[in-house]
Amino acid sequence: MNRLTRYSDQAYALLRIVTGFMFSFHGVQKILGILSDFQPAVGSQLWFGGLIELIGGLLVMVGFQTRWAAFLVSGTMAVAYFQFHWKFQFGPQFFPAINKGELAALYSFVFLLIACRGGGLWCLDKRQSR
């Protein structure tokens, strides 16, 4: 296991890049309608969520303004989980596997980690500070 420790910074950077890319695709679906039959009305809460997914995901992926972008999308996913998945219903609906909120909950915590750690390797934040 000690051999893997030397790659922790690279693994974290890959986590940030892949998570940002996958997250931004949800925004592409909502905003641009690509590979999706559903497009929310412009100006609706879901449309703004899609805009945050698209822009925030791209910012996290490239590592530009990483901390604030990750914090914003973490909060967005927390709202998505509580408002659209859990709906504050107790009982079986509380569990993410039942209410289909696993991705929202997981994204919320992964982006919270990224907000706390920052861009790490291979990010534009470091180029900006030079």
Image (spheres, helix red, strand yellow):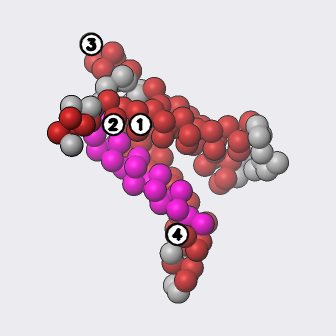
Determine crowd level at label 3: few under 14, some 14-19, many 20+ residues with C-alpha closer than 10 A.
few
Q: Nearer the viewer, residue 41 or 30?
A: 30
Asked whether the viewer can see residue 68, the reply is no
Identity of the residue drawn at 21% across and 31% down = 6
User: Cα distance, mark 3 to mark 1?
Assistant: 21 Å
User: Cα distance, mark 2 to mark 1?
Assistant: 6 Å
Residue 70's place in the image compared with 81, above or below, is above
Determine crowd level at label 4: few under 14, some 14-19, many 20+ residues with C-alpha closer than 10 A.
some
**What's drawn in magenta, residue-wise?**
100-118
Q: Looking at the picture, how far across and down is residue 19, in whole percent?
A: 48, 40
SS class of the residue under badge 1?
Answer: helix
Q: Are marks 4 and 1 in contact (CB under 8 Å)?
A: no
Identity of the residue drawn at 33% across and 15% down = 127
Position of 46 compared to 52: left or right?
Answer: right
Q: Quadrant of the C terminus?
A: top left
- Mark 2 residue type: Tyr
Q: Is residue 102 magenta?
A: yes
Q: Looking at the picture, how far across and down is residue 75, in whole percent?
A: 45, 53
Q: Looking at the picture, how far across and down is residue 21, in whole percent?
A: 54, 35
State the residue lying farthest toward the right.
37
Mark closer to the observer (3, 2)? 2
The image's mark for residue 12 is 2
- Mark 4 residue type: Pro
Q: Nearer the viewer, residue 33 or 68?
A: 33
The image's mark for residue 96 is 4
Determine crowd level at label 2: few under 14, some 14-19, many 20+ residues with C-alpha closer than 10 A.
some
Instruction: Report which residue position mark 1 lands on.
Output: 16
Please tell me which of labels 4 and 3 falls first in the chain: 4
The image's mark for residue 130 is 3
Residue 89's place in the image compared with 9, above or below, is below
Please tell me which of labels 3 and 2 falls first in the chain: 2
